[in-house]
Image: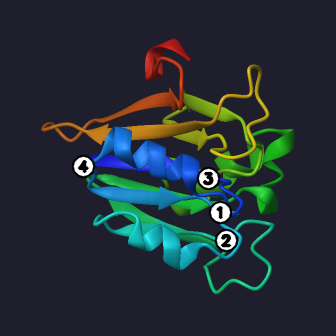
């Protein structure tokens, strides 16, 4: 199973189009918020199922604040992250994940890619496709693949640069 994880497109979908051209076919698209009114457009950009959550800039959206989904054997919390103060660290996300028996937490908001696999929990952020804030300011996303044994693998990808496998980030 191949899952494309994006966030913080802020109504600028051109880079998402480019990413879909590079990564399709995909089995699932996850958007972690700040779509800014582009929900319907994003859903038409792929034939894969799409799940989105609301970000702090999705003011009049009907998107849910967060979702819990199942991907393979994993219980996954999708959130934009601003309610968990992710700009200050992952402590609240970890606590919430533990309380809800979550295996993977996916969040956005900081516009910086992150992959933290520790203490029995995976916490990831694909960064931003429109307004990146990490060094180099390259638009980023994550491809998650679940192999035949049911194990999840993650690749942080940059729109124009090489990919970083989970063990290298």
Q: Are marks 3 and 4 in contact (CB under 8 Å)?
A: no
Compared across the picture, whether 41 is left or right of 90 comes to: left
The secondary structure type at the circle numbered 3 is: loop
- Which sits earlier in the primary sequence, circle 3 or circle 4? 3
Residue 145, horizontal then vertical, whole percent:
30, 39
Residue 122, horizontal then vertical, whole percent:
51, 38
Q: Are marks 2 and 1 in contact (CB under 8 Å)?
A: yes
- Which sits earlier in the primary sequence, circle 1 or circle 3? 3
Classify 76 as above or below 162: below
Q: Residue at x 40, y 58 (%)?
A: 29
Q: Is residue 45 visible?
A: yes
What is the crowding at mark 3: few (fewer than 14 residues within 10 Å), some, or many (at least 20)? many
- Residue toward you, 123 or 113: 113
- Which sits earlier in the primary sequence, circle 2 or circle 3? 3
Q: Is residue 105 visible?
A: no
Cα distance between the residues tagged 2 and 3:
10 Å
Classify 55 as above or below 149: below
In which quadrant of the rendered view does residue 144 lie? Answer: top left
From the image, tell me which residue sits under label 4.
25
From the image, tell me which residue sits under label 3.
7
- Foreground mark, 2 or 4, reads 4
From the image, tell me which residue sits under label 2.
54
What is the crowding at mark 2: few (fewer than 14 residues within 10 Å), some, or many (at least 20)? many
What is the crowding at mark 4: few (fewer than 14 residues within 10 Å), some, or many (at least 20)? some
From the image, tell me which residue sits under label 1.
33
Q: Are marks 4 and 1 in contact (CB under 8 Å)?
A: no
Q: Residue at x 40, y 65 (%)?
A: 45
Cα distance between the residues tagged 2 and 1:
5 Å
Classify 39 as above or below 168: below
Residue 65, horizontal then vertical, whole percent:
66, 74
Q: Are marks 2 and 4 in contact (CB under 8 Å)?
A: no
In which quadrant of the rendered view does residue 131 lie? Answer: top right
């Amino acid at each position: 199973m191949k899952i494309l994880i994006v966030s913080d497109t802020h109504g600028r979908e051109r880079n998402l189009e480019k990413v879909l051209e590079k990564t399709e076919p995909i089995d699932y698209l996850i958007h972690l918020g700040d779509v800014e009114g582009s929900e319907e457009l994003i859903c038409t950009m792929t034939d894969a199922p799409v799940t989105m959550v609301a970000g702090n800039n999705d003011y009049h959206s009907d998107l849910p604040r967060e979702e819990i989904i199942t991907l393979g054997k994993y219980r996954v919390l999708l959130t934009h992250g601003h309610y968990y103060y992710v700009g200050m660290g992952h402590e609240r996300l970890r606590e919430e994940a533990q309380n809800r028996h979550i295996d993977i937490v996916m969040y956005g908001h900081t516009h910086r890619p992150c992959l933290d696999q520790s203490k029995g929990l995976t916490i990831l952020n694909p960064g931003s496709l429109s307004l990146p804030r990490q060094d180099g300011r390259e638009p980023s996303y994550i491809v998650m693949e679940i192999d035949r044994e049911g194990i999840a693998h993650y690749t942080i990808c940059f729109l124009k640069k090489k990919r970083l496998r989970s063990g290298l980030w």
